[in-house]
Image (spheres, helix red, strand yellow):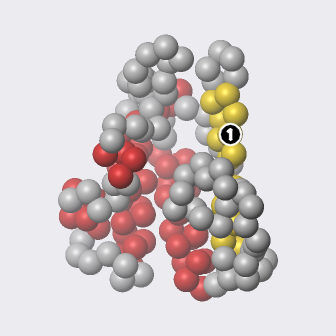
Amino acid sequence: MSQHGETLHNLNADGVLEEGRLLLCDAGGETVEGYCSDHTRTYPVSGRFTQKQKDIYNIVLAAHDHVARIVKPHMMYTEVHNAAYMTLAEGLVGLGLLKGPAADAVAAGAMTARRWARGRSTTARSPNGPPSREPASTARRGGSNRGP
């Protein structure tokens, strides 16, 4: 739990919740067999999103819903990942937070977080090996938290 969503897996939990901030819950677990599951949700501390927070939340929700609609057997993770990036970029262009065509922003790497550039990704990992090349259809489909 953190009000610092820019810090993934933030272990510093000694802060006090502040009005107008967002609370990020990024929790997960892993079995001894290597199966991992993750629950990530964002909540407004005050109980209501500001308009700007709601706009961003809805862009992320749209990306989630788009991916849930298109995922099918034999798709590669990169295809799903890029579809989410396009939805996010289109939303950010619509808010004026990205300039130019969404496809150009995605192609230029505007949606690529630094951690992806270091070689980590959401691809499945064997407990003793590198990321797998499994199709995205092997991933479990999760529900969404429809906040605002």
Q: Is residue 147 something that shows in the picture?
A: no
Q: Residue 38, relative to residue 25: is it above or below?
A: above
Q: Which residue is drawn at 37% across and 79% down?
A: 97
Quick one: quadrant of the C terminus?
A: bottom right
Q: Which residue is drawn at 42% across and 71% down?
A: 91
- As helix, strand or loop, the secondary structure at mark 1 comes to strand
Quadrant placement of the N terminus: bottom right
Q: Nearer the viewer, residue 92 or 3?
A: 3
Residue 11 spot, x, y in % from top left: 65, 50
Q: How crowded is mark 1: few (under 14 residues within 10 Å), some or many (20 or more)?
A: few
Report the residue at 78% width, 77% height from top. Answer: 47
132 with respect to 23 (left or right): left
Please give the name of the residue rendered at 55% of the width and 83% of the height, measured from the top-left corner.
Answer: 52
Q: Name the residue under label 1.
A: 28
Residue 72 position, x and y percent, is: 48, 35
Q: Where is residue 105 in the image (x, y as percent from the top left)?
A: 25, 65
Residue 15 falls in image quadrant: bottom right
Of 134 and 73, which appears nearest the observer?
Answer: 134
Residue type marked 1 = Gly
